[in-house]
Image (spheres, rainbow, N blue to C red):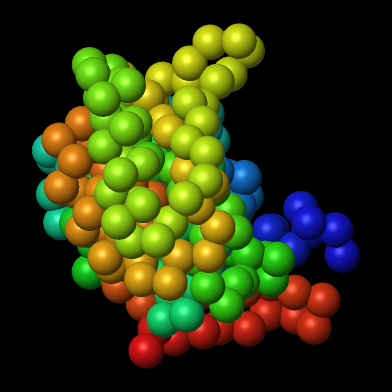
Amino acid sequence: MDAKGLKIEAARAALAHVEDGMRLGIGTGSTAAEFVRLLAEKVSGGMRIIGVPTSERTAALCAELGVTLSTLEETPELDLTIDGADEVGPGLDLIKGGGGALLREKIVAAASARMIVIADESKLVDALGRFPLPIEVNRFGLRATELAVARAASNLGLSGPLTLRVTNGQPFVTDGGHLILDASFGRIPDTRALSNALHAVPGVVEHGLFLGMAQLAVIAGSGGIRTIQAN
């Protein structure tokens, strides 16, 4: 089965956790998009859910396919969020943000009673950091923020390039109007220390370390579907 097929199977397995009447956080990215397409089929068949999207891109896809949407202002407490991940590490700690929606994804996940992450087996890692860590930053003081992030990482023994994310020759701008630095630190031995250090930098809006947020991972691989519970 190819990568897309694995994403579809992970999304299909996660859909079994969605119950009629749920307030559902809906993630962003290629795997989450497959989930939206399968969810829309259930909705067209009579399932009633209220979805809160984590990006304008997901909102547009849901609207196109007829999935009823709300906002966190209208629906501030959610039953479940289903979202993808760029890396799934021990204890279901995650790196997210490859699609550029990490701030809204984290806000929606935090507003949910449960979070299920869906991914193919290539996303499983022994330690987070192989995938560059997205760091959402304010436009103001970008260079100062970049230097402060580098110092914070260096204090933890981490180094590597910080790259401003660019799309079509222009800086990538998030739905919140911010920029993203992709940090190629490599293996991150102490994710919580790095999380705290990054949050202490004033220009950092949020980062892509999702620690202790997911309760279940649905992983699709060549051997089928397996689920991993958080420790």
Residue 65 percent coordinates (x, y): 54, 35
Q: Establish if 72 lies above or below 126.
A: above
Q: Observer-nearest residue: 105 or 80? A: 105
Q: Residue furthest bottom?
A: 231
In the shown orientation, is residue 37 left or right of residue 189?
Answer: right
Give the residue displayed 45% in from the left and 65% down from the top: 188
Q: Observer-nearest residue: 89 or 130? A: 130
Give the residue displayed 63% in from the left and 64% down from the top: 123
Q: Residue furthest right?
A: 1
Give the residue displayed 63% in from the left and 83% down from the top: 226
Quadrant in the picture for the N terminus: bottom right
Residue 87 percent coordinates (x, y): 55, 62
Q: Observer-nearest residue: 214 or 139? A: 139
Q: Quadrant of residue 109?
A: bottom left
Quadrant in the picture for the C terminus: bottom left
Question: Would residue 53 be visible to someone looking at this image?
Answer: no
Question: Would residue 136 be visible to someone looking at this image?
Answer: yes
Give the residue displayed 69% in from the left and 58% down from the top: 8
Residue 164 percent coordinates (x, y): 48, 26
In the shown orientation, is residue 62 left or right of residue 108?
Answer: right
